[in-house]
Image: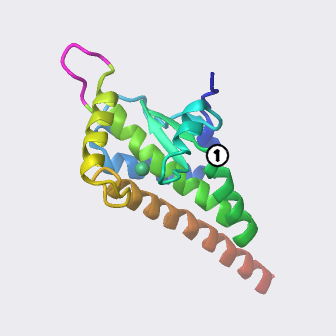
Amino acid sequence: MSYKDTGYYQKFPEEWVYFLKDELAREFPEYTSGKLLNGYLPPVCRKSLVGKIASKFPSKPEGITLGGVVYLTPHYMRVRNLFHAGSGAEAAKIYEFGMYAHETYHAIDQELTPDFPFLKGSGKWKWLMKYIARLIKTPNAYKHPMEIPAYLFQKHLKSLASKTLEKKASLNMHSYLSP
Ligand SMILES: [Zn+2]
C-alpha cells in the first residue's frame, strides 16, 4: 500500500497555495461550488507501485494522476535533484510546485467530471477513458487536448511563484541598501 499524503501542499509557501486555489477556482467554476470541500487539494503518493509502473512509459512521466490521486514517479526526484544541483533550492521548489499544480489540475478535473448515471464516483474513471481514447489519436503529451491546459496552468503557477521570490529578493536588496 502506498501512503497518501493529504497535506502535501503544506510543503509550499502559503502564498503559493493561495494562488493555486485561486487559479483553480478561476479554471473550474465548480471548484468552490460545494461538490469538493472548500479549498480541496489532492493527495500525493511519493512512492507507489502506480508511480513505479508509470515511470516505465516511454514519455518518462514525473507524475501521474489517477482517480484524483497524484502519484509521483522515480523520475520526479531525479529531475528535481537536477534542478537543485543546477540552479539551487529555489529553482527546485518552483519545479516541485509546477509539477504539483499540473497534477492538481488533472485531479480536480477528474473529481469534477460528472459520473455515469447511477454510478457514484465513476466520473474520474470516465475522465481516464476519455484521456486514453484521445491518447490514441494524440500520442504527444504536449499536444493532447487534456494536457494543453494542464501545461499552461503549470507555467502560469510557476511564474506566479517565481514573482514572489523576486519580490522577496528585491525587498532584501532594499533593506540592505537603505538601513
Ligand atoms: Zn498531465
Q: Secondary structure at mark 1?
A: helix
Residue 131, image x, y percentages:
30, 42
Residue 142, image x, y percentages:
37, 60
Q: Evaluate whether residue 151 shows in this view.
A: yes
Q: Amino acid at mark 1?
A: Pro
Q: Residue at x 31, y 60 (%)?
A: 143
Q: Residue at x 21, y 13 (%)?
A: 118
Toward the top, the furthest residue is: 118
Q: Evaluate whether residue 178 shows in this view.
A: no
| In this picture, residue 89 sits left or right of residue 62 | right
**Colour pattern of the rendering:** rainbow
Residue span colored magenta: 114-120
100, 53: nearer the viewer: 53
Indicate yes or no whether the magenta region holds residue 118. yes
Q: Quadrant of residue 88 in the image?
A: bottom right
Can you say which quadrant of the picture contains the N terminus? top right
Residue 114, image x, y percentages:
24, 29
Above or below: residue 138 compared with residue 2: below
Toward the left, the furthest residue is: 117
Indicate yes or no whether the magenta region holds residue 95. no
Can you say which quadrant of the picture contains the C terminus? bottom right
* Residue linked to disc 1: 74
Q: Residue at x 24, y 51 (%)?
A: 137
Residue 71, image x, y percentages:
55, 38
Q: Residue at x 26, y 38 (%)?
A: 130
| In this picture, residue 9 sits left or right of residue 65 | right
Dot 1 crowding, Cα within 10 Å, few <14, some 14–19, many 20+:
many
Specify the principal SS of the magenta part. loop
130, 172: nearer the viewer: 130
